[in-house]
């Protein structure tokens, strides 16, 4: 026999509590009736009855399993594209050791949470590129994460329209028969998007794609290192300062029924992002039968309740009138 909850301390504790309380009850009964004639064998019979159904309740709590049964386990999958901003501002150090290094670390943790889903990677700045197509292979995905740096894409500004259109195209051209849920996790500091990305929102909603935005950076911001120097703002001829600009990220998430989250040394909302993605219903990609132990607690519980019912409605006379 296998026990679902083999906690001997709990069972022993409950038994001790029952024994103490019932001993107090018997002692009080004796004090009240010591001058009356008591049929002891009936009292013992009532005690035996209560011990029996309490023992059955304890066995039911422990969850006895006898034999095995076959259960069908359904496997659900999601398609998720991670869209990562690789503009120069992602080298800022308002998050240690830098925004991009922090993103790379968290991306690997995120990938572990979605091991049963297909993951893809899109990188962008002024242009967008597929870095890793949708795959179940975590090792391949992690290799592409390791290689992320701001030199992989042209840096003449930040254009959000390009990666979103690229993701839509890849999702809609997928010929897999399963209609997996489709999500985009957009990771950026939110700067210099402009307004052109708003035209793609209708396409995202039509395709059933939800965008979950992860804002990286702080409102205080920092300068942007470039080699041994700093990037200079040509308008002021002073070191450029980059700050988290969440407005467009929040707007995009809200318009696609997604969610907005932040990542910084102060705000660690990755667990909230994981929970939001997990709430998305995935498609059934397969099923398998597994052998599971059959918990028979119900029979012991039913027997205990039956004895308790007998104890309540058919009490034994213990005192001669």
Image: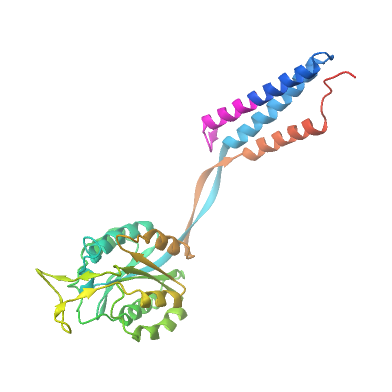
Read off the magenta span.
1-19
The answer to whether residue 239 is left or right of residue 4 is left
Residue 229: where, in percent of width, then height? 10, 71
The answer to whether residue 198 is left or right of residue 127 is right
Q: Quadrant of the C terminus?
A: top right
Magenta: main secondary structure? helix
Residue 4 lies in magenta, yes or no?
Answer: yes
Residue 127: where, in percent of width, then height? 25, 80
Along the line of sight, which residue is nearer the eye, 242 or 177? 242
> As displayed, is residue 98 above or below residue 199?
above
Q: Quadrant of the N terminus?
A: top right
Say how many tags the image has: 0
Q: Which residue is found at the position 31% from the left and 78% from the top? A: 163
**Seen from this angle, which residue lies furthest right?**
321
Quadrant of residue 276 in the image?
Answer: bottom left
Tell me if I can see residue 65 in this picture: no
> As displayed, is residue 107 above or below residue 301?
below
Q: Which residue is found at the position 39% from the left and 75% from the top? A: 171
Tell me if I can see residue 76 in this picture: yes
Quadrant of residue 167 in the image?
Answer: bottom left
Residue 298: where, in percent of width, then height? 65, 40
Along the line of sight, which residue is nearer the eye, 80 or 287? 80
> As displayed, is residue 67 above or below residue 177?
above
Along the line of sight, which residue is nearer the eye, 136 or 93? 93
Quadrant of residue 137 in the image?
Answer: bottom left
């Amino acid at each position: 026999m296998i026990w679902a909850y083999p906690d001997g301390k709990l069972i022993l504790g409950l038994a001790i509590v029952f024994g103490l309380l019932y001993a107090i009850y018997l002692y009080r009964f004796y004090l009240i009736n010591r001058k009356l004639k008591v049929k002891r064998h009936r009292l013992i019979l009532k005690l035996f009855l209560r011990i029996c159904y309490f023992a059955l309740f304890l066995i039911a709590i422990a969850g006895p399993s006898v034999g095995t049964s076959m259960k069908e386990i359904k496997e659900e999958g999601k398609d998720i594209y991670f869209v990562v901003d690789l503009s120069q501002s992602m080298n800022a150090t308002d998050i240690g050791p830098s925004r991009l290094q922090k993103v790379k670390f968290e991306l690997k943790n995120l990938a572990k949470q979605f091991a049963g889903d297909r993951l893809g990677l899109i990188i962008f700045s002024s242009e967008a590129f597929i870095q890793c197509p949708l795959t179940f292979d975590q090792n391949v995905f992690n290799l592409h994460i390791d290689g992320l740096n701001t030199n992989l894409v042209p840096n003449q500004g930040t254009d959000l329209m390009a990666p979103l259109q690229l993701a839509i195209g890849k999702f809609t051209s997928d010929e897999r028969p399963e209609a997996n849920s489709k999500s985009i996790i957009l990771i950026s500091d939110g700067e210099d998007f402009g307004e052109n990305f708003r035209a793609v929102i209708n396409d995202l909603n039509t395709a059933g794609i939800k965008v979950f935005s992860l804002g990286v950076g702080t409102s205080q911001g920092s300068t942007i290192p470039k080699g041994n120097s700093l990037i200079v703002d040509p308008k002021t001829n002073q070191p450029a300062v980059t700050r988290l600009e969440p407005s467009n990220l929040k707007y995009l998430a809200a318009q696609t029924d997604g969610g907005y989250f932040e990542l910084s040394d102060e705000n660690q909302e990755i667990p909230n992002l994981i929970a939001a993605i997990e709430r998305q219903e995935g498609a059934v990609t397969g099923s398998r039968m597994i052998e599971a132990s059959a918990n028979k607690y119900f029979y012991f519980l039913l027997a205990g309740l039956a004895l308790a019912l007998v104890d309540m409605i058919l009490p034994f006379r213990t005192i001669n009138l």
